[in-house]
Image (cartoon, grey):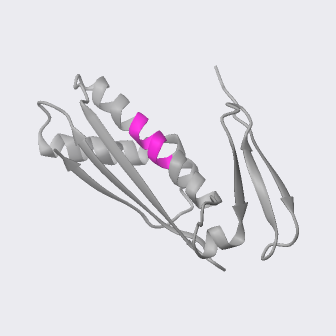
Amino acid sequence: MATTRTAKTHWEGNLMEGKGQVALASSNIGTYDVNWPARAEQPNGTTSPEELIAAAHSSCYSMAFSHGLAGQGYTVETLDTQADVTFQPGEGITAIALTVKASVPGLSEADFQAAAEDAKKNCPVSQALAGVKNITLDATLI
């Protein structure tokens, strides 16, 4: 069964001086300020589309990795994923660096790396971001 999730943004003003708010409408868990300086300079308590993409990518990747390992008969003790999304004004999103550290008893390093790469390739958010030419993965088995 397909699901649809919704976010809504209200914006006022031009790009450089304007501001807005993005609401996570499906879950109704929050409304967050957005503006140009948060994208191109410092966040200063304000989010950006790239931070929201990083949140989506790190959580989706973690789910896909955990699911793939479970399908191979492994139990994940811990899995910590960070996604760093690089935004270059005038160019867009130029890179995403995924970093994952996981504790998975009984899993060999080779099988861990293969599963990590598989999750990167098959996570639905990774697939949606396929236009980003530089998506890297640093996976550490702890």
Task: Indicate whether residue 79 is drawn in magenta.
Answer: no
Q: Give the range drawn in magenta.
A: 57-63
Residue 66 screen position, x and y as percent: 34, 32
Residue drawn where x is 59% and y is 60% of the image? 50
Residue drawn where x is 19% and y is 34% of the image? 104
Residue positioned most to the top:
1
Quarter residue 71 falls in: top left
Measured along the vertical axis of the image, is residue 115 above or below residue 140?
above
Residue positioned most to the right:
13
In this picture, residue 31 sits left or right of residue 138? right
Q: Which of 46 and 124 is in front in this view?
A: 46
Residue drawn where x is 52% and y is 48% of the image? 55
Measured along the vertical axis of the image, is residue 45 above or below residue 80?
below
In this picture, residue 107 sits left or right of residue 2? left
Main secondary structure along the magenta-highlighted residues = helix
Residue positioned most to the bottom:
90
Quadrant housing the C terminus? top left
Residue 111 screen position, x and y as percent: 18, 40
Quadrant housing the N terminus? top right
Task: Indicate whether residue 61 is drawn in magenta.
Answer: yes
Residue 14 screen position, x and y as percent: 86, 72
In this picture, residue 125 sits left or right of residue 78? right
